[in-house]
Image (cartoon, rainbow, N blue to C red):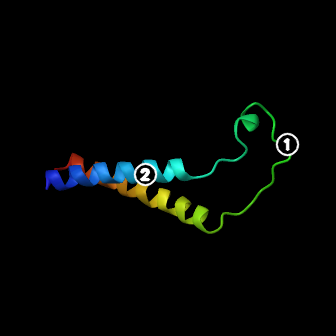
Amino acid sequence: MKTFLFVTQIVLSLLLSLTVLVQQRGGGLSETFGGGGDTFHATKRGAEKVLFYATIIFSVLFVANSVAFLFV
């Protein structure tokens, strides 16, 4: 059981990292330093929405697996 949880933790961490890194960012570096005044609010559509929900699901599974790993 411990090996299964350990392998699951590694897989979930890789998937979570991948989904976070693949997501698009807002305006880039100029927005960090106060630029980007011409930004607008846009809703998530298509693949961006799927990646957003996948990130949430993988993070919840990661935390649940970490808690389960504590009790084994």
- Residue 1 left/right relative to 20: left
Cα distance in 3D space between marks 1 and 2: 31 Å
Q: Residue at x 70, y 40 (%)?
A: 28
Residue in the image at 75% along x and 30% along y: 33
Identify the residue position indicated by label 1 in the image: 37
Q: Earlier in the sequence, mark 1 or mark 2?
A: 2
Q: Nearer the viewer, residue 9 or 60?
A: 9
Residue shown at the point (62%, 69%) measured from the top left: 46
Q: Residue furthest bottom?
A: 46
User: Residue at position x 51%, y 49% from top?
Assistant: 20
Work out whether residue 26 or residue 71 is closer to the camera in this orientation and state it. 26
- Picture coordinates of residue 62 (x, y %)? 36, 52
Q: Position of residue 16 (x, y in %)?
A: 43, 51
Where residue 66 sits: x, y (%)?
Answer: 30, 48
Give residue 32's position: percent from left, percent from top.
72, 34
The three-letter amino acid code for the residue at tag 2 is Leu
Q: Which residue is mark 2?
A: 16
Q: Amino acid at mark 1?
A: Gly
Secondary structure under badge 2? helix
Q: In this rendering, would 37 be left or right of 3? A: right
Vertical arrangement, residue 24 with respect to residue 33, above or below = below
